[in-house]
Image (cartoon, rainbow, N blue to C red):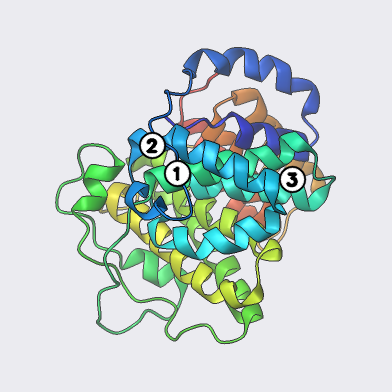
Amino acid sequence: MSNHAPMAVEALVRHGRAPAVHRWLDHYRHKLEDMPDTASRITAENWREALGDPRRITDWTVYFERETAERPWREVLAEWWPRLLPGIAAGAHPAIRVGHAVRTLLGGEATAPRVTEPAHGLGYWAARHQPLPAPTPPAPEPSAAAALDAVPPVSDQSGGIRDRLARLTGFPVWPPRPAGAPDEARARLEELVRAATHRYAAYGYGEPIMLVHAATAPNAVLHALPALPRTLWGPSLEAAWAASAAVTAAYAPAEPAPARGPDPSAPEFSSLPSSSSSLSSAEEVFARAAAHGNDHAIKFADTALDVGDATALRAALSAVELIPPAL
């Protein structure tokens, strides 16, 4: 399984919960296994034959550790980002892990452990790389919310993520036209994160853990944009949409249901304005996710706070209610 610890810990620290990290890790560490043995060395000449082979995860990790030790991490990221984007749906976790790692590096000193972390994320992404089919040609949808609503479910929503993605035949076109300027691509990406976060409150019940990735994956791409050449922002938007649509097709139920989270009319949230939230309310939402302890609930709350409006915060509370607690 994916190692969610670096992502959850980064979110905990970012939102002022550093004192809780060691206790959280004590509860999480039993889920982890040792890395498998290496098979053969990956090089600049033979990497294509190893792409998408989960058995080569250690080979890929060693390769990126070597690359980031020998070259600036931004240079490695810029080289490999367009190579890996077509396989972004690979369980969604690899791109999310890279996004959290990049956010850490952009916010502080590039220490050796901080540079090693994106190497692990990129290695996992390369090993789990799984391309998706092209969008379905009918008329493009006008908004991210409408596009997510129009995503048809896969024919058989059973099995793991790779099984379900193999049944994907296409998804709606969005945005309605290719993003032009990089800043437009960024704005569209923010729209997608907001729409996917809001949608969770009504559809998260179908698969509470997996459906958080429809929002956290594009948000991770958003985190990475400042470290990437602006020419890659448009392709990043397209890949983020593909990932969000793929997760929606693989796991979302056909019909919405009332959120099982706290009643939006409850006193502590009834005063939230429709487009923004007070700092104290946002902190309370993240505190609940941190106390809940599940890594997905923590990461989704982190995304909800990035969106920042009352609907997003209520969606985060729904995740806390729907996902089994870890602490």
Q: Are marks 3 and 2 in contact (CB under 8 Å)?
A: no
Earlier in the chain: of badge 2 and badge 1, it is 1
Residue 56: mark: 2
Disc 3 is placed on an element classified as helix
At 52% from the left and 82% from the top, the residue drawn is: 179
Earlier in the chain: of badge 3 and badge 2, it is 2
Disc 1 is placed on an element classified as loop
| In this picture, residue 265 sits left or right of residue 238 | right
Q: Where is residue 90 in the image (x, y as percent from the top left)?
A: 38, 48
In the rendered structure, which amino acid carries the disc numbered 3? Thr
Q: Position of residue 198 (x, y in %)?
A: 51, 56
Disc 2 versus disc 1: nearer the observer: 1
At 27% from the left and 44% from the top, the residue drawn is: 162
Question: Mark 3, residues whose alpha carbon is within 10 Å: few (<14), some, or many (≥20)?
Answer: many
Residue 42: mark: 1
At 35% from the left and 82% from the top, the residue drawn is: 140
Question: Mark 2, residues whose alpha carbon is within 10 Å: few (<14), some, or many (≥20)?
Answer: many
Q: Are marks 2 and 1 in contact (CB under 8 Å)?
A: yes
In the rendered structure, which amino acid carries the disc numbered 1? Ile
Q: Mark 3 points at which residue?
A: 104
